[in-house]
Image: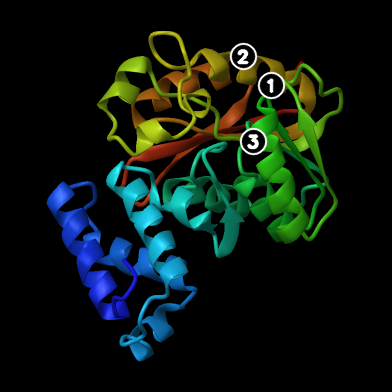
Amino acid sequence: MNQMHTYEAVWACRCALSEAEVTDTANLDARLLVQAATGFDSTALITKRNHILSEEEGKRLHAFLEKRLQSVPMAYILGHREFYNLDFKVDPRVLIPRSDTETLVEAVLSRKIPIGNMLDICTGSGCIGITLSNALHCPVTLSDLSSDALAVAEENAQRLCKETYRVMQSDLFSQINEKFDLIVANPPYLTEKWIEETDKQVKKEPRMALQGFDEDGLSLIRRLIQESVFHLKGPGLLFLECDWRQIEAVKTLLLANGFNNVYSEKDLAGKERVVYGERPCTSR
């Protein structure tokens, strides 16, 4: 794609993406791909529309476009994704941060209570824990079973976290001994059937971060709720993301394990997305 002007490169990418029907945002994707290949920002993409792509820029753009045509998510191609006004590094080792998950952050912050320490379990890129740690001005433990995911979380924490943090590899609470004021989690919760119903882009994300196992997808959430009782101070708060089809089941699990003040919050699409509850002082 060298020997093209910038505007021609955008047009060529847009046409290729539209024809392949791999995205509903072909124009935006095309502009972002050209920006990534040239290093231009959105303003320069306009002011330097007659810039002729160098050989190296053309090669980069071709490689980026080929990946997108294979349904590789834009966030993996660009290497980052914005979450709650912070720019997180992402790659195929971690789930891509989503705007729906910002609902969990908002739900925590709406409580407006002091938090001494917190745990972000199944942390992935670290987006939830790092964002909340900065907002609440408290230390955070970022935990995940995947060492690959933790490597990404470590990079993000080094760059973005303003408070004390630590990164721990753990199968849920297996390596965690202390108690926390707040535990947050976006654990794997999709059923195998739901994963198969997702589009090709989602299937490019790590299945380990998607599939919750058991027929209802709640295998890990059951364990997490049961074990979190012993890792929350009294009172302590547990916030979970799950699918809207699982909300009532997760509420029941929280109540059955001694939590009270159990509530849920809707995401931007108006679907129930986050469930939370409080471990009272009199709990186990």
The label nearer to you, 3 versus 1, is 3
Residue beneath disc 2 = 223
Residue beneath disc 3 = 149
Q: Earlier in the sequence, mark 2 or mark 1?
A: 1
Q: Earlier in the sequence, mark 3 or mark 1?
A: 3
Q: Residue furthest bottom?
A: 47
Q: Residue furthest left?
A: 19
Q: Which label belongs to residue 172?
A: 1
Q: Position of residue 38 (x, y in %)?
A: 45, 73
Secondary structure, mark 1, is loop
Q: Residue at x 38, y 9 (%)?
A: 215
Q: Residue furthest top?
A: 214
Q: Is residue 249 left or right of residue 163?
A: left
Alpha carbon separation for disc pair 3 and 1: 14 Å
The label nearer to you, 2 versus 1, is 1
Task: Determine whether label 2 and label 3 are within 8 Å by CB.
Answer: no
Q: Give the vertical position of 52 relative to 244 (above or below).
A: below
Check the picture and name the quadrant holding the N terminus: bottom left
| Kind of residue at disc 3 | Ala
Check the picture and name the quadrant holding the C terminus: top right
Secondary structure, mark 2, is helix
| Kind of residue at disc 1 | Leu
Residue 59, picture quadrant: bottom left
Q: Give the vertical position of 217 relative to 270 (above or below).
A: above
Q: Residue at x 60, y 27 (%)?
A: 260
Q: Residue at x 86, y 22 (%)?
A: 177
| Kind of residue at disc 2 | Arg
Can residue 124 be seen in the rendering of this structure?
A: yes
Q: Is residue 198 left or right of residue 187?
A: left
Alpha carbon separation for disc pair 2 and 3: 21 Å
